[in-house]
């Protein structure tokens, strides 16, 4: 039975965001364990400096996201707000380093299947979508209900590269569509829990989730267009 002052429901919501952040961290680790975190154990090749920097920045972001969720669960909102300044700077760094890494990867011919210049649209689109979602969350930092939901969608949006590296044959056979689909299912699961608990679909989840799905479809469409090729060649230089 819920408490009269609503403490129990608020605690349940705090635990939910903490568990969501932990799940995001575990997915990131599972996806990049063989090629990054435990690469020596798996005999994976050495990584270029920029890729290693990208790994450090993304790891820092995932860890900070989990810490921030934990601070809210522990009712240390004061520390959460202070760390938010570092979080905003780190999010900007995620975008900058992510864009540079994607372009350098295309320059080196890195791609999971499609031609590198075609595939370049996928990581670029992903990191820009992350930046927009987190930017919207930061802009709504004084509206806690919007801030936490947009931040969660933003955090889940960058899990696609990790999902793409999880060594499950059925998942790998599905390719980029399957990787996007799993990302979307994670978002849908969070939205469904929130909507069931609050008996309504929060507009932050509605708009954030819709934006993520449409951006995925749009990125795939743009990548196949003739107009994208000269842009990609210009970016690669």
Image (spheres, rainbow, N blue to C red):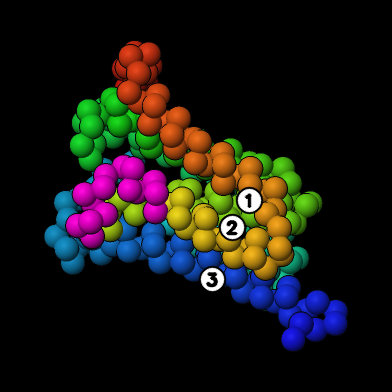
Do callouts 1 and 2 mark residues in contact (Cβ within 8 Å)? yes
In the drawing, what numbered circle is on residue 191?
2
> The N terminus appears in which quarter of the rendering?
bottom right
Query: Is residue 7 shown above or below 28?
Result: below
**Label 1: how many Cα within 10 Å (few below 14, some 14–19, many 20+):** many
Give the residue number, with chain letter if any, for mark 3: 19
* Residue 54 place in picture, x, y as percent: 39, 46
Q: CA distance from mark 1 to mark 3?
A: 17 Å
Give the residue number, with chain letter if any, for mark 1: 205
Disc 2 is placed on an element classified as: helix
Residue at image x 40%, y 24%? 222
Residue at image x 20%, y 37%? 113
**Label 3: how many Cα within 10 Å (few below 14, some 14–19, many 20+):** some
Q: Is residue 181 magenta?
A: yes
* Residue 93 place in picture, x, y as percent: 51, 42
The range drawn in magenta is 168-182
């Amino acid at each position: 039975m819920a408490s009269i002052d609503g403490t129990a429901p608020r605690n349940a919501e705090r635990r939910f965001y903490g568990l969501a952040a932990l799940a995001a961290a575990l997915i990131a680790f599972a996806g990049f364990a063989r090629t990054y975190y435990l690469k020596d154990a798996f005999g994976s090749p050495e990584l270029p400096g920029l890729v290693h920097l990208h790994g450090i920045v993304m790891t820092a972001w995932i860890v900070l996201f989990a810490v921030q969720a934990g601070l809210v669960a522990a009712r240390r909102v004061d520390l959460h707000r202070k760390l938010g300044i570092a979080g905003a700077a780190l999010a900007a760094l995620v975008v900058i380093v992510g864009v540079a890494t994607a372009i350098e990867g295309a320059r080196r011919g890195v791609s999971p299947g499609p031609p590198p210049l075609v595939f370049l649209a996928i990581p670029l689109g992903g990191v820009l979508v992350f930046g927009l979602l987190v930017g919207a969350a930061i802009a709504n930092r004084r509206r806690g209900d919007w801030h936490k939901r947009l931040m969660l969608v933003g955090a889940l949006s960058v899990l696609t590269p990790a999902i793409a590296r999880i060594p499950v044959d059925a998942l790998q056979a599905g390719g980029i569509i399957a990787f996007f689909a799993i990302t979307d299912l994670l978002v849908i699961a969070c939205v469904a829990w929130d909507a069931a608990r609050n008996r309504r679909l929060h507009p932050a989840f509605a708009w954030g989730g819709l934006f993520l799905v449409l951006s995925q479809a749009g990125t795939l469409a743009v990548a196949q267009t003739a107009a994208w090729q000269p842009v990609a060649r210009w970016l690669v230089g």
